[in-house]
Image (tube, grey):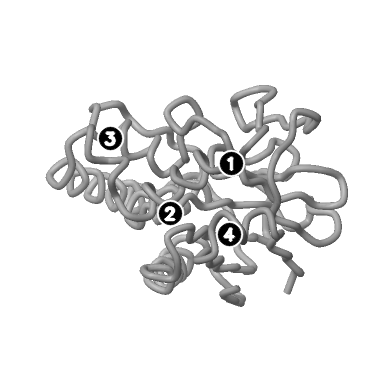
Amino acid sequence: MINIVISNQIREKCPDFKLAVIECKVRNTPTSNELWDEIEREGTKIISEYKLEDINKRNAISATRKVYKLLGKDPNRYRPSAEALCRRIVRGLPLYKVSTLVDIINLVSIRSGFSIGGFDMDKIRGNLVLGVGTADDDFEGIGRGLLNIEGLPVYRDSIGGIGTPTSDNERTKISDSTTNLLVLINGYSGETGLQEAVDFSKILLERYAFLKKFTIEII
């Protein structure tokens, strides 16, 4: 598996941090009606359980926001992706249909509250280090342009940043041709719920993404 180092910067601010690393061989396709039905059912459940002001109190989301604050980042301006997705749902705004792999990751994130990175492994160079963004980082968020990641947790390969809990990078994003998928489920709240998110990810990948290989490590 790819080697991932968790920096002391992160460990000191979040000693309970746990990371689920999934590597798998898959096939990407346009989103199916069946997958989108699952997403809509999960959205209905979120609406029934949470008001807008309660989204950021979900355990996994709250823990991610806490780390942002400890690192000097405003989580209301740079929301973790799981929070942003759930807020859209509760506000009655439609989610974007992207592709099967991206939509699977979004569904797991909505259900679990974990901010999850999804990457094309063939675009990653070398191993990864989870550190903290700086003002010198050149980071192009997917669909967001140049993103100020100073104070955000960030995974870097030998070239630069590839993913934060707010947005992943254009350089290593999932595309229609992605076959080697890396999924990083970030447990800033600790290990609680992490295995359930892994198991749900595997079910969805088997059901919709022609899963051929599935390797998991929790660090």
Distance between mark 4 and mark 3 Cα atoms? 23 Å
Q: Nearer the viewer, residue 7 or 54?
A: 7
Q: For the residue carrying disc 3, how many other residues have a C-alpha within 10 Å: few (<14), some (14-19), or many (20+)?
A: many
Label 2: element kind: loop
Label 4: element kind: strand
Residue at numbered disc 2: 114
Of circles 3 and 1, which is in front? 1
Identify the amino acid type marked 3.
Answer: Ile
Q: Which mark is residue 89?
A: 3
Residue 174 picture location, percent across and down: 64, 46
Residue at numbered disc 4: 184
- The residue at 37%/34% (across/down) is 95
- The residue at 31%/48% (across/down) is 39
Label 3: element kind: helix
Classify the position of the C terminus by image quarter. Answer: bottom right
- Where residue 76 sits, quadrant-wise, is top left
Q: Are marks 2 and 1 in contact (CB under 8 Å)?
A: no
Identify the amino acid type marked 1.
Answer: Leu
Residue at numbered disc 1: 71
Left of 174 or right of it: where is 1?
right
Classify the position of the N terminus by image quarter. Answer: bottom right
Residue 78 picture location, percent across and down: 50, 30
- The residue at 76%/58% (across/down) is 128
**Pointer 4 or 2: first along the chain:** 2
**Pointer 3 or 2: first along the chain:** 3
Q: For the residue carrying disc 1, how many other residues have a C-alpha within 10 Å: few (<14), some (14-19), or many (20+)?
A: some
Distance between mark 3 and mark 1 Cα atoms? 28 Å
Distance between mark 3 and mark 2 Cα atoms? 16 Å
Left of 154 or right of it: where is 209?
left
